Amino acid sequence: MIKKYLPMIILTALLTLLPIVFGLITWDKLPDPMPSHFNSAGEADGFMPKAAVVFALPGAMVLVHIVCAAVTLMDPKRKNIDGKPFLIVLWIVPVVSLLVNGLVYVYALGGKINITTGVLIGCGILFIILGNYLPKCGQNYSIGIKTPWALNDDENWRATHRFAGKCFVLIGVLTVILAFFVGRSPALFWAYFVLIILSSVAPAGYSYVYYLKHGKKE
C-alpha cells in the first residue's frame, strides 16, 4: 500500500508547499509583517514576520500531512480504507494549505475579501465530500467515528457511518449557507463550532444507542 500511494503522497506534499512559490514570486509586494490570524469578522488581528508566513505555515502543514499519511498507512486495518477514502485523507491538507494561504496572500496584497467567509465555504465543501465517503469506509482506527461499539461490531460501524455521512452533508450545507451571513453578524461564526461539535457527538451518540438496541456482536 505504501508503494502504491508514494507518488501521490509526494505530489500532495509538494502541492501543500506550493504557496511558498507564490510567496517568493510576490515577495517584494507582500507587507512585512503579514496577517496570520483573523477574527470572526474576517479582519486581521494577528501578524507574523513575512518569512514566517511564507515558509513556516506551509512547512507546518506539510508536516501534518506527512504524519496523517503515515498514521493511516500504519493502521492495522488499512485495507478497509484503501482507495478513495485514503485519497481523501491525502488531499485534505493540500487543499487546506492552498485555500488558507491563498486567502492570506490575497488579503495581504490588498484584496477585498472576507477570510472567514472563504474558510467556511471551504470547510463546508470538505464536510460534504467527507459525508459522501464516510459510509464507504470499513472498520479502521484512522478514519471515521471510532467509538468502541462501532469498532467491535461491523454492523454498528456501517450503521453509524451511514448516519454520520448524512450528518456531515447536512452540516456542510449549513456551513456554506452560514458563510454568506457571518460577515453581517460575526457572532454567527461561533455557530460553526456548534456544528463541529455536533459532527462528532451526534454520530457517537447514534453508535451508542445502536449498541444498546442491538447489542454487541461477538
Image: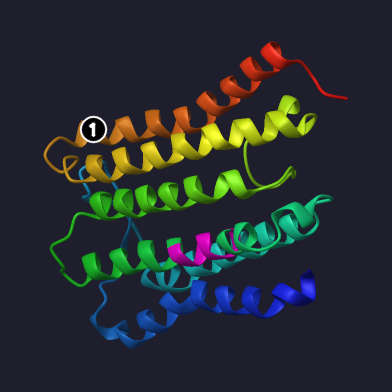
Range of magenta residues = 89-95
- Height in image: 217 above or below 171? above
Q: How many marks?
A: 1
Outermost residue, top side: 212
28 or 98, nearer to the observer: 98
Residue 106's image quarter?
Answer: bottom left
Whether residue 2 is in magenta: the answer is no
> Which residue is at a point 56% across and 36% down the rendered structure image?
162
Residue 66's image quarter?
Answer: bottom right
> Which residue is at a point 29% across and 70% down the rendered structure image?
105
Q: Position of residue 178 (x, y in %)?
A: 24, 39
Q: Position of residue 173 (x, y in %)?
A: 32, 42
Q: Position of residue 22 (x, y in %)?
A: 36, 81
Is residue 55 shown left or right of residue 49?
right
- Whether residue 33 can be seen here: no
Q: Which residue is mark 1?
A: 188
Q: Quadrant of the C terminus?
A: top right
Whether residue 92 is in magenta: the answer is yes
Q: Quadrant of the N terminus?
A: bottom right
- Height in image: 106 above or below 146? below
107 or 14, nearer to the observer: 14
Instruction: Say what secondary structure mark 1 lies in.
Output: helix
- Height in image: 60 above or below 120? below
> Which residue is at a point 68% across and 34% down the rendered structure image?
157
Mark 1 crowd level (few <14, some 14–19, many ≥20, 10 Å Cα): some
Residue 20's image quarter?
Answer: bottom left
Outermost residue, right side: 218
106 or 132, nearer to the observer: 132
8 or 153, nearer to the observer: 153
Q: Position of residue 208 (x, y in %)?
A: 65, 18
- Whether residue 216 can be seen here: yes
